[in-house]
Amino acid sequence: MKTKARIAVLVSGGGTNLQALLDAQARGDIPHGEIVLVISNNRSAYALERAAKAGIPSRVLLRKELGSQAAFEAALADALRENNIDLVILAGFMSILSQSFTRQFEGRIINVHPSLIPSFCGEGFYGLRVHEAALARGVKVTGATVHIVNEIPDGGPILLQKAVEIRPDDTPEVLQKRVMEQAEWILLPRAAAMLCAQLCEKGEWK
């Protein structure tokens, strides 16, 4: 029986969600999991600095250098298998993964999305665009969702959600920060802990 699931975190930018995971791990909040690898599709992502400061090995895989999405995904799959990864966490990873890739790791890839799915989600909804759409629509509540990743963008089974109030004077940037602080940074470590505990208890994914 496993004592700890091996986690890889995929990133593209600043890495605030990665930091939330690293902080949770340092607090002991992911007792059955360990972040052992960070992979970025952006060589200048600050998330790589966060990984280095935490002593986590990292790797950069660039689709442009590899020649195609298929070649990128093949290299990504190889890196995950080489490191015996049990759980893949997308933490601000700005690349849609194909069905052929997600099926190789079915039920073992999770993502955090900055809205209450099924609202403001799917292809084209990422980053500030999500919060701009929520404000333009005039909704009073938004939030974040952690879900299993499948071939449909933001379409996999929902694991956790948390609501966040929208205030009358919110800008997309202000709302983005509140959703991160009040929902994303809480939900993502919680989901990681939940799935890692499940893996270690059962030895397999439900």
Image (tube, helix red, strand yellow):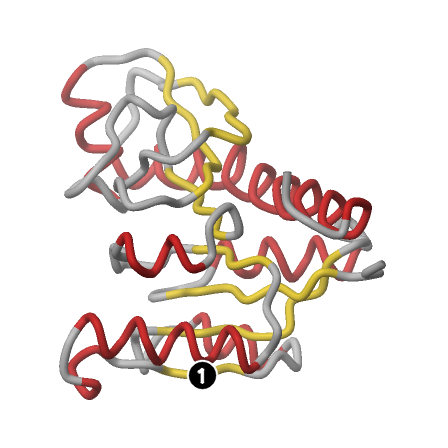
Q: Quadrant of residue 160?
A: top right
Q: Position of residue 33 (x, y in %)?
A: 73, 58
Horizontal side of residue 160 vs 24, given as left or right: left
- The amino acid on which the numbered mark 1 sits, given as a three-letter code, is Arg
User: Which of the 4 image quadrants contains residue 34?
Assistant: bottom right
The residue shown at (49%, 79%) is 49
Few, some or many residues within 10 Å of mark 1 (<14, 14–19, 20+): some
Q: Is residue 92 above or below residue 193?
A: below
Query: Mark 1 sits on what residue?
Result: 59
Question: Along the line of sight, which residue is nearer the eye, 48 or 193?
Answer: 193
Q: Which quadrant would the N terminus be assigned to in this image?
A: bottom right
- What residue appears at the point 34 percent right and 60 percent down from the top-left corner? 101
User: In the rendered picture of this protein, how many numbered marks are placed on residues?
Assistant: 1
Q: Residue at x 35, y 33 (%)?
A: 175
Question: Residue 116's spot in the image, x, y percent?
Answer: 38, 24
Residue 188 position by quadrant: top right
Q: Is residue 12 left or right of residue 138?
A: right
Q: Which quadrant: the C terminus?
A: top right
State the residue in front, 35 or 52: 35
Position of 63 relative to 161 (above/below):
below
Residue 4 in the image, given as x and y percentages of width and height: 78, 61
Query: Measured from the top left, where is residue 80 in percent x and y?
Result: 50, 73
**Residue name at image x 67 percent, y 66 percent:** 6
Depicted 143 relative to depicted 100: above or below: above
Label 1 element class: strand
